[in-house]
Image (tube, rainbow, N blue to C red):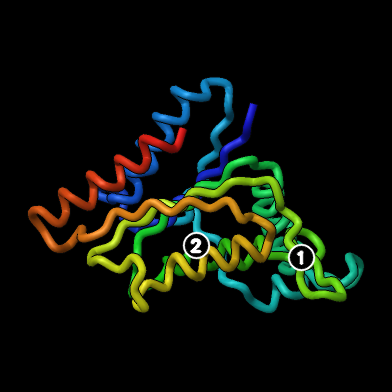
Amino acid sequence: MSRVLIIESSARQQDSVSRQLTQTFISQWQTAHPNDSITVRDLAVNPVPHLDINLLGGWMKPAEQRNDLEQVSLERSNQLTDELLAADVLVMAAPMYNFAIPSTLKAWLDHVLRAGVTFKYTDTGPQGLLSGKRAYVLTARGGIYAGSTADHQEPYLRQVMAFIGIHDVTFIHAEGMNLGGDFQEKGLSQANAKLSLVA
């Protein structure tokens, strides 16, 4: 039995293409893997704070020196990190906002990219500690950006996943969502075709 962690980040609930892709993924995965557990963390409904002085204090100070806010921040980060550590499969659903990922997803990443927990520093540089996991990234984009210099989603997420040891990463892009007509239909069709191969 595998454990799947899904991270939703679209600010939209209704009419969100990335959420539609997530639901398709869940349906197909459950059909193919009925005994797997699926946990969904919705960063739009329950956003996590951005990296701040309290979280830094929680990470860096000995327990007896932390104030209440630092302790709460540490416990939140621990919860998010424990969810990721427990997962065999990570799914990130991310619309493209201003050529990049939503700030809510960036905030989540800032909580779980932790020295000594998800990566470590060695004499030869940083080493990821989450090897053996798979990741899927489901994106929705108003235009067509794959492979262009304007795409700051895929290169960034590939880099941070590799940084923590996740090298098996599959991207499924629904592109052209704001271009209307054939572009939108083609983008969704291509994304769903790739999704059908996942499970």
The x and y percentages for residue 173 are: 34, 55
Q: Residue at x 56, y 71 (%)?
A: 50
Task: State the SS at label 1.
Answer: strand
Q: Residue at x 54, y 34 (%)?
A: 38
Would residue 109 be seen by someone viewing this image from the given angle?
Answer: yes
Q: In the shown orientation, is residue 81 left or right of residue 14?
A: right
Q: Is residue 48 left or right of residue 26?
A: right
> Does 6 sit left or right of 98 as displayed?
right
The correct choice, above or below, for 109 with respect to 36 in the image is: below
Q: Residues within 10 Å of mark 1 (few under 14, many from 20)?
A: some
Total count of labels? 2
Which residue does the image show at 23% across and 64% down from the upper left? 142
Dot 2 alpha-carbon crowd within 10 angstroms: few under 14, some 14 to 19, many 20 or more? many
| Amino acid at the residue labelled 2 | Leu
Vertical placement of residue 125 versus 120, above or below: below
Residue that label 1 marks: 127
User: In this image, 133 relative to 24: left or right?
Assistant: right
| 133 lies above or below 55 | above
Picture quadrant of residue 101: bottom left
Q: Position of residue 83 (x, y in %)?
A: 66, 46
Say which residue label 2 marks. Answer: 105
Please report the residue visible at 87 percent of the width from the left and 75 percent of the height from the top.
123
Q: CA distance from mark 2 to mark 1?
A: 22 Å
Q: Which mark is residue 27?
A: none
User: Which circle's residue, 2 or 1, is located before the other in the chain?
Assistant: 2
Q: Amino acid at mark 1?
A: Gln
Residue 68 seen in this snapshot: no
Q: Quadrant of the N terminus?
A: top right
Mark toward the viewer: 2 or 1: 1
x%, y% of residue 77? 69, 59
